[in-house]
Amino acid sequence: MAQIKVEALDKSFGSFHAVKSASFTVEDGQFLCLLGPSGCGKTTTLRMIAGLELPTAGTIRLDGEDVTMNRASARDIAFVFQLFALYPHMNVRRNIGFPLKCEGIGAAERDRRVVEAARILRISHLLDRSVSGLAGGDRQRVALGRAIVRKPKCFLMDEPLGALDTEMREAMIHELRALHDRLGATTVYVTHDQLEAMAMADRIAVMNNGVVEQVASPRDIYDRPASLFVADFIGSPPMNFLPFRGGLLTGAEAIRLGERDVAIPAAREAMTESELVLGVRPEHVRFSDRGMVRGEIYGTEYLGTTQIVTVTTHYGPLKARSPSSNSFRIGETIGLDFRPDTLSIFDKASGRAIRTALHEGGAHG
Amino acid sequence: MTSATAAHSVVEPTATTRRFAGSLVVLYALITMIPLAWIVLTAFKSPDDAISYPPKVMFKPSLEGFCNLFTTRSRQTPEFIRSLGPPQGLCDSIARDRNMVVAGPSNYVPRFINSLIIAFGSTVLAVALGTLSAYGFSRFRVPLKDDLLFFILSTRMMPPIAVAIPIYLMYRTIGLSDTRLGMILLYTSVNVSLAVWLLKGFIDEIPREYEEAAMIDGYTRFQAFVKVVLPQATTGIAATAIFCLIFAWNEYAFAVLLTSGNAQTAPPFIPIIIGEGGQDWPAVAAGTTLFLVPIVVFTVLLRKHLLRGITFGAVRK
């Protein structure tokens, strides 16, 4: 097992700049998710770590050793592909044993390790089946088997659950996490699904347009988004954004929103008068007759235990999460309040979060 | 089977359509089979039956055609023939009935062997080169890829025989005229363009994740190619091999022009089998019949791949 350190990684395909100066570290035994919308460069980053693409610039270190220009075969890593890439001309046993054959491991030892891997993944009964007849979840397990049988330095997974149906996916999320806890293997996992990332990762690296926007624990990503993009991408429904113009002094504990003062976590940096954005998670919106923002109920979405209430306001539609026992009348005028200690403030021009007391609670500041 | 009372399916053909399609297939098969059948029949006729008019469908079968195909004979006086001992085998006795004796083997067997060596040699070479270059074109960013592929295809845009004279002169200068190597190289160069294009289609359809998985598992690219790509490309390789073999096996024009002795293949040899008083048609037909055998065997062996190859590889996209 190993630490992966990616420093200032750049990749261009012709004129297309796929990855821009990406840096992050995956500690030994950690589960890192590369999360982002399609085309954000997350798969390219993963393929560079694997050695399937060579970076235009930057370095990749495995346990301190610079492997940037090494062949994939020389890196001692395992890769699980989205479409599994099981060899159709081999049965399950030979598929799982294929990486061992390359290392020149004898047939007896090979078989012992294949059987062991199959036992961990609970596919022992499938060993002599052809891979083409397997169900999606079992194919995924065979692909995982091929990865774990070799005991590599780290696992790289490229949307391994993307081809499975929802039910199978839920089950595999737990299996993958349990497998990770059991093997303690350093893992980099690419996904566009925030629920997968939130459920499995120790740390999440959110990417957008080739840039790593934030690397933090799932909780920090959610509670303390480092940029407008992260705040908007994570959470369903996403964070509400209320644009306003104003300045900010270090230590300020309120902002001027329209005619009212809104309490915020104390600012830790000063901003000159500029376009700013106040970010509020839907669950931090409270209904109050004396609320700072007034609006008209536009509609509700019932989600079981909670409901999402959309309110048309001066700042655009705001979404609030409310227990589904509350009832709302469409067209009703209502006041809204925000929980002060959870608010985020962003600089609209750069998209960057402004440092406030909010960031001091986080493990990664 | 659906019962008569059940509503008929909109996608399944009806019984009438089936019968109609079936009879069309049978009719077409008959039309294509008749010349072949005629050749096989002629191979077992005597020279007189072969040229009789109206043509005979019923006749007394004879192996004279095959004997004449494999032997050369000389005419002798009845006295000389009587002075010889008893006939040496079936062919000798057939020849003696016509006042001839077997003088020695004909050139059919060496020509047939030339055909085998040249056709299979060029097929192996064309398919091997074609697979490697198709893999390269399929997987790597080759500069001017589209232009190169078009250039490769363009060699097929004229009949190869259009360049016969330059090739004849070149071969004479560099000493490749009438050599097996020369013919193998020639047929390979004609077939390789077909092989590259056909195989590129097949290899494009093999996801590259397979090789990438193998390379991550510690194999080199060439090992990944051999262990992962080739087994999955067998269908395409078999189909391509059959097409290449059929071309090389049947090629006539270049063989006439460039070979005369050592390296002559069977196609130019068969039509010029001369018997007494002109073409020996039963011998020609016997030579043709035997000439069909290797290609039939090869095609039957690879038939499953050929069918799958045509439906899954070349046509599906």
Image (cartoon, grey):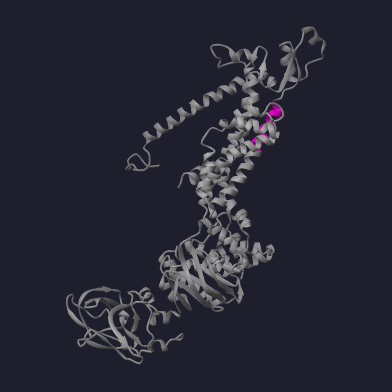
Which quadrant of the structure image shows residue A348?
bottom left
Q: Report the front residue among A189 and B94.
A: A189
Image quarter hosting the C terminus of chain A = bottom left
Residue B230, placed above or below residue A26 = above
Q: Main secondary structure of the magenta part?
A: helix
Q: Report the front residue among A20 and B119.
A: A20
**Where does residue A335 sit, x and y in percent of width and height?**
21, 83
**Where does residue B254 sit, x and y in percent of width and height?**
61, 30
Which quadrant of the structure image shows residue A266?
bottom left
Task: Report if residue A321 is visible in the image.
Answer: no
Residue A157, placed above or below residue B309 = below
Image quarter hosting the N terminus of chain A = bottom right
Q: Report the front residue among A71 and B314.
A: A71
Image point (50%, 48%), residue name: B146
**Where does residue A165 sit, x and y in percent of width and height?**
42, 64
Residue placed furthest toward the bottom: A251
Q: Report the front residue among B80 and A341.
A: A341
**B112 inside magenta stretch:** yes
Task: Report if residue A191 is visible in the image.
Answer: yes
Q: What residue range appears in magenta? A: B108-120
Residue A60, placed above or below residue B196 = below
